[in-house]
Amino acid sequence: MFIEFVQEQMLLFVALIVIILMLIYTYVGDRIAGYKSVQTDEAIRLYNDDAFMLDVRTAGEFKEGAIGNATNISVTELPSKIDSLKADKSQPVLVYCLTGARSSRAASMLVKKGFTQVYNLAGGINAWKSAGLPVGSVKSKKNRKK
């Protein structure tokens, strides 16, 4: 009976399997990746505890505003500039971009380079703004150091 149902509803069954796998990946994906995705409430705690803030948006996006004294290195430039970061590899690092997609790639790069406390802001600066949190204006320097 179950096999007959699966045969008749193959598309629905495949969709169910994909959804289950996506849920499992969401649960264990961060553990496998070596960094943790955090919501804005946890990001505020990290910011207040002086985490190194790394903004991986483009320079143009960065000029529109940043979180605190974030250092801006676009995700495309990060591989060549990662060794020049002024952050201790054991210091917490909060990485963010516009939506959280580019920053997750950057977080993976940091983990591979030996950073041990890497956090990705889920939803990026858009989530930060949606939560009503302040975004500061950026001075003319391209890469500001904390």
Image (cartoon, rainbow, N blue to C red):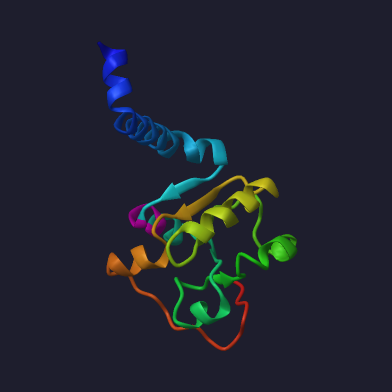
- Which residue occupies the foreground of this view, 27 or 120? 27
Q: Assess whether residue 129 is covered by the magenta stretch.
A: no
Residue 131, image x, y percentages: 28, 64
Look at the picture and state if 96 lies above or below 92.
below
- Identify which residue, 107 or 10, lies in the foreground: 10
Residue 94 can be seen, yes or no: no
Residue range highlighted in magenta: 40-44
- Which residue does the image show at 36% across and 53% down from the upper left? 39
For the N terminus, the quadrant is top left
**Residue 104, relative to residue 67: is it above or below?**
above
Furthest residue toward bottom:
140
Q: Residue furthest top?
A: 1
Image point 64% across, 66% down: which residue?
76
Q: Looking at the picture, how far across and down is residue 140, in whole percent? A: 57, 89
Locate residue 146, reporting x and y percent.
58, 71
Q: Residue at x 32, y 21 (%)?
A: 7
